[in-house]
Amino acid sequence: MTDALTQLRSMQSADLPVHGGRTLAYVYDSGLPEIDRIGRGAVAAYAGSNGLDPTAFPSLLRMETEVVGMAADLLDAPETVVGTVTSGGTESVLLAVQAARDAHPEIDRPRMVLPTTAHSAFHKAAHYFGVEPVMVPVGPDFRADPAAMAAAIDERTVLVVASAPSYAHGVVDPVTEIAAAAAAHGIRCHVDACIGGWVLPYASRLGRDVPAWTFAVDGVTSISLDLHKYAYAPKGTSVLLHRTPQLRRPQFFASAAWPGYTMLNSTMQSTKSGGPLAGAWAVMRSLGDDGYERLARDVFEAVDRIRAGIEKMPELTEVSSPDSTLIALGTDASCDPFTVCDEMAARGWYVQPQMSYAGAPATIHLSVSAATLPHVPEFLDALAEAVAAAVAAGPVAVDPGVAAFIADLDPLALTDEDFDGLLLAAGLIGAGSEPGDPSTSSGHSLALPQRMAEVNAMLDLASAAMREALLVAFLDRLTRPSRAHRG
């Protein structure tokens, strides 16, 4: 019998590396092996504990209240603040929207006011909870326009949202003005600080210029911040803070309408492993305030060195001046972002492509971690080589026939045959599989491409609705059951 752990290690070798500072998306690496060991050990120790009933596992209750307390201290929270540990930023956002909706049962068709740069988790919340998103264009610096946000508030508005920072461009919205407008109408203001919440306070402490965004801003009623990002905790933990218990109460769910135990939940989950909470608590207690300040110093030094290096590459431009650890780069006409991303991957670095949106061009996105600092010279060398290779190859072009095929597709009526036709035209499937293979349709096998520039350029041509439909179809095809290996 093959050892399952050996199999896991073998399979994992094909994944992006989570250590070493070379993956600039999805993972956040402190570069401290001992901290990683502590976090993983705590996760394993509590993997069987259940957060469903805090009275049954009082150690989980203690850890949650202490984690929330650490977050509250960091974010200038008043003594009235309360909070909940969730599974990630999306769950924190969902709960913030659900609580805002349920606080106003008298409003039949509630709305929330969002800058167009707000995280897509708010659109997921809108879809789940029937809260209409009112989208407000941002300024040329990609920051929310507070006057336009205020003008969008009406009698159906239950929530106004700001970002600290926005993911796509790394800039902090003018929270002071946005929160004041919300407060003037008696409406909640949520600050999505999922990616910046644990690093921006240290940026301010280090003397960097960060716009005000914490509970020190009047009118801010809730804040979300992820611990598995710049608190460097294991996946997946986030915190949702409310200024008062009254604001949090609609978030809770209770049901005695069945013959079993009375269900009582603070989050969207019922049963939940205590592992991620224990991992976060152990990492946070081990690093402490001084440890996080050192890590913040390292990550911002890495950001500054990367930005200085990019200034020497005329083909690249920063599309915004980042307030945090996120950098968005555009390219000139000599090359394209998607090819640069491919060339970086070929050199052992993962950087994230971002599609064009609302007239803004496609970009290269960097999420810098503390572990990247020692490797900045290697990163800049690789980036210069990647840009040179992209310039030599020229901007990626989509075959006119494929472009026409995409233009003729209806996102509301996309069939398996339509999707297969597009995959075949793009070279992503080949004949030869057996009919009935769950990962195929029409006798074709799905192949993951080694280079993504052509695929991303194809998606970039599609409308937002078409892009969503194509990616849903791709995910459906990619995740059909594998039944060939049963151990």
Image (tube, helix red, strand yellow):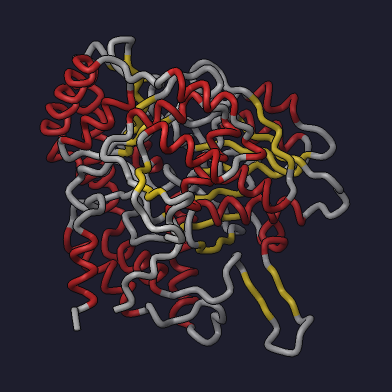
Question: Quarter-wise, where is residue 220 in the image?
Answer: top right
Horizontal side of 36 relative to 366 (left or right) equals left
- Which of the image's four quarters has the N terminus? bottom left
Seen in the picture, residue 206 relative to 394 is either above or below; the reply is below
In the image, 322: left or right of 163? left
Residue at the spot 12% in from the left edge and 40% down from the top edge: 374
Residue 277 point in image, percent of width and height: 42, 69
Coordinates of residue 292 in the picture (x, y in percent): 29, 51
Write the residue at 75% across / 24% down.
Answer: 151
Q: Nearer the viewer, residue 94 or 8?
A: 8
Picture residue at 19% right of the left edge, 79% below the top: 3
Please identify the quarter of the rendering in which residue 479 is found: bottom left
Q: Quadrant of residue 145?
A: top right
Task: Compare residues 261 and 350 and report the one nearer the observer.
Answer: 350
Horizontally, residue 326 falls left or right of residue 441, namely left
Q: Say whether residue 326 is visible.
A: no
Q: How many marks?
A: 0
Q: Quadrant of the C terminus?
A: bottom left
Q: Is residue 232 visible?
A: yes
Q: Residue furthest bottom?
A: 259
Measured as percent of width and height from the top left, residue 76 is found at 50, 48
Residue 390, percent across and down? 23, 20
